[in-house]
């Protein structure tokens, strides 16, 4: 049995991933449906607007990713895994791969489900995916979810405690980056280069919704923003792998 298979079995042997999947999809698609039902009579719907609930699903997926590693530390099963497979880096990479793929699939289901909900509730021709930017705003959600899951899993591996890891990722995404933007003089400049600001630029930038930032106002383009976000995530993962390799389980 491969490490990937083992990690997949361990992940789905608990209830938390299932609850997180249902919650992420329910929040994201439900928010899109609620928003579509409210604006259909007052303003035209856009593709970007159907994805306004993606941030809620993103938070849930990050919690799931953090739990994937902190739960093992909590119950001590990580020690048995490392005894059976001394190559800790290989174990963590397998776990990361499983979580990232699952997060990608959740993101794609949530994004296209949200788009479909908006389409069904409004029947607006503006929701037809006929530009590269519109396809990116929908199909690109899974890439951001996958990167965010790796980010959260890395934090979980570094912190090793569920409460601490979940609190850190939630505060960072929901509050910390926005607060940095409030710093006088330099706040906006720093905010532009924070990881999730870049991720959201990729998801929303260049679209026609109220939350979209024109490409001309971005420090780098949407796809470059995604690469930048994934690069930061990769650096954090490397730090986590080095720490796990050197630290006692």
Image (spheres, grey):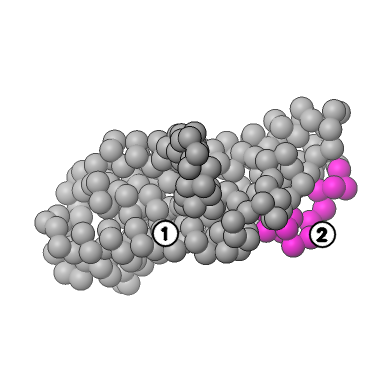
Magenta stretch: dominant secondary structure: helix
Q: Quadrant of the N terminus?
A: bottom left
| 231 with respect to 247 (left or right) | right
Q: Residue at x 27, y 52 (%)?
A: 157
Identify the element where label 2 is drawn: loop
Q: Which residues are magenta?
A: 124-137
Residue 106 percent coordinates (x, y): 54, 51
Residue 48 percent coordinates (x, y): 71, 46
| 25 with respect to 61 (left or right) | right
Residue 94 vertical position relative to residue 10 in the rendered view, above or below = below
Residue 239 percent coordinates (x, y): 28, 60
User: Depth check: 241 or 239 in front?
Assistant: 239
Identify the element where label 1 is drawn: helix
| 209 with respect to 184 (left or right) | right
User: Which residue matches tag 1?
Assistant: 232
Tag 1 or tag 2, which sits nearer the N-term? 2
Residue 49 vertical position relative to residue 88 in the rendered view, above or below = above
Q: Quadrant of residue 82?
A: bottom left
What separation in Å lies between label 2 and label 1 (alpha carbons)? 31 Å
């Amino acid at each position: 049995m491969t490490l990937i298979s083992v990690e997949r079995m361990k992940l789905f042997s608990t209830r938390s991933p299932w609850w997180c999947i249902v919650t992420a999809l329910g929040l994201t698609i439900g928010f899109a449906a609620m928003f579509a039902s409210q604006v259909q009579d007052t303003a035209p719907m856009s593709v970007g607007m159907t994805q306004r609930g993606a941030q809620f699903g993103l938070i849930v997926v990050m919690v799931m990713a953090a739990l994937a590693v902190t739960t093992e530390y909590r119950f001590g099963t990580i020690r048995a895994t490392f005894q059976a497979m001394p190559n800790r880096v290989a174990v963590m990479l397998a776990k990361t791969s499983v979580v990232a793929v699952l997060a990608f699939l959740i993101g794609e289901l949530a994004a296209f489900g949200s788009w479909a909900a908006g389409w069904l509730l409004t029947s607006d021709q503006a929701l037809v995916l006929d530009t590269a930017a519109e396809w990116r705003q929908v199909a690109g959600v899974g890439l951001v979810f996958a990167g965010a899951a790796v980010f959260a899993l890395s934090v979980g591996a570094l912190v090793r405690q569920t409460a601490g890891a979940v609190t850190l990722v939630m505060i960072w995404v929901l509050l910390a980056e926005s607060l940095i933007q409030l710093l006088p003089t330099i706040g906006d400049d720093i905010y532009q280069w924070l990881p999730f600001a870049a991720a959201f630029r990729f998801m929303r930038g260049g679209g026609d919704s109220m939350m979209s930032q024109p490409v001309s106002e971005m420090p780098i383009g949407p796809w470059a923003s995604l690469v930048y976000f994934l690069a930061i995530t990769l650096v954090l993962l490397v730090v986590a792998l080095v720490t796990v390799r050197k630290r006692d389980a």
